[in-house]
Amino acid sequence: MRKKKILYFVEAFGGGVFTYLVNLTNELCDEYDIYIAYGLRKQTPKNFKKYFDKRIHLIKVQNYQRSISLLRDTKALLEMKRIANKVKPDIIHLNSSKAGILGRFLFRNSNVPVFYTPHGYSFLMADISNQKKAFYKLLEKAFAFKNIETIACSKGEYEITKELTSNATYVDNGINLKEFDGINMDHQTNFDHLKIATLGRISLQKNPVMFNRIAESFPNVDFIWIGDGALRDKLTAPNIKVTGWVDNKTALNYLADTDIFLLTSLWEGLPMALLEAMYMEKICVVSDVVGNRDVIHDEENGYICDSVNDFIRKVKSIGIERHTLAELIKRAHADVINHYNSAVMAHQYKKIYLKALN
């Protein structure tokens, strides 16, 4: 019996979206014939093909780019059409804003089920003008066709999605627990010499200015930013180490040797790095934004902060309230095992896909 074909389109092929697709498609490829049409970004791993099961078909879209360009976007549309005509998928799944806009326009009258996952709406970005935010929100509403279902990647993103379309559901992101095989997770916290880390691209979204201010407030604490990016020069505190881009295994090994995971983001979808830190039993201290607050419940499995002073106060309190931390990190770890993992995520996607095919 022929496997059903799923064709994923993704322009933002890096960071959390990349990890999401690796985890999801590797889980699904036993039951489905998987195709991924992707665009390259600076943060796409150089050896990205090695992350995927050999049965997964990877197709490069030459004209994908993040910014809006009538010429390039028209060429990308034509590429997407050619790819779909060649693959003849049973399901089309669009990922992130650019592929989502182009794909929903192109496949609005498709005779196969079409899905869209935003991974953090563009109109929530803090680095754009109010006019651009309004324009991007208008685009999302205009392209929210009733026959295309939006699958948000967190409950918070789902609540925003319901303002745009009634044809929506959500599946929480999940990490692949097998990725931690071989990672030494026996690190013992030394409260007299804490190590604080974050993981991701050094961009406005991740708020390196706030991370730097927190580091300046703890000059005797070692801070590490696992990753790289255009705003690296904002990390001026002498106690911050920047690793540069490293592969996932190396990144997890860096994270394993720390105590506190700090996430100062201005906006999120549902951050994979946060789930990884929770599973590794790091003390998670995060900003109060969609995605973060869907996963972290203040003082139950981590800490939520709404200002730089709040971050500083919570970090200071960790050394004082150490007797409560064991239960807190155990609850975070259990949340990932029971819910935020790729097996659970794939199972939920299978149910959605099967329902659409029947």
Image (cartoon, rainbow, N blue to C red):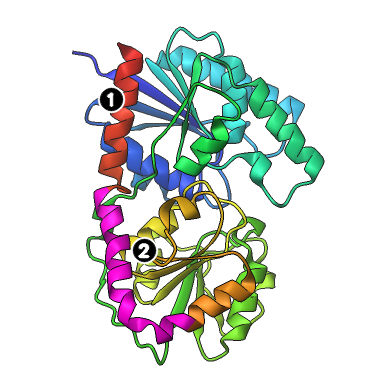
Task: Give x and y (percent) for residue 173.
Answer: 39, 44
- Local crowd at mark 1 within 10 Å, few (<14), some, or many (≥20)? some
Element type where label 1 sits in the image: strand
For residue 96, which quarter of the picture? top right
Left or right: where 198 falls relative to 217: left
Q: Residue furthest left?
A: 1
Q: Are marks 2 and 1 in contact (CB under 8 Å)?
A: no
* Residue under the point 33% across and 50% down: 175
Element type where label 2 sits in the image: loop
- Local crowd at mark 2 within 10 Å, few (<14), some, or many (≥20)? many
What's the magenta bit mostly, secondary-structure-wise? helix
Which corner quadrant holds the C terminus?
Answer: top left
Residue corresponding to mark 2: 301
Q: Which residues are magenta?
A: 317-338
Which corner quadrant holds the N terminus?
Answer: top left
The earlier-in-sequence mark between 2 and 1 is: 1
| Rendered position, 198 above or below 147 | below
Dot label at residue 199: none
| Rendered position, 213 above or below 264 | below
Q: Is 327 included in the stretch rendered in magenta?
A: yes
Q: Is 23 included in the stretch rendered in magenta?
A: no
Residue corresponding to mark 1: 32
Task: Give x and y (percent) for residue 304.
Answer: 50, 64
* Residue under the point 29% across and 27% down: 350
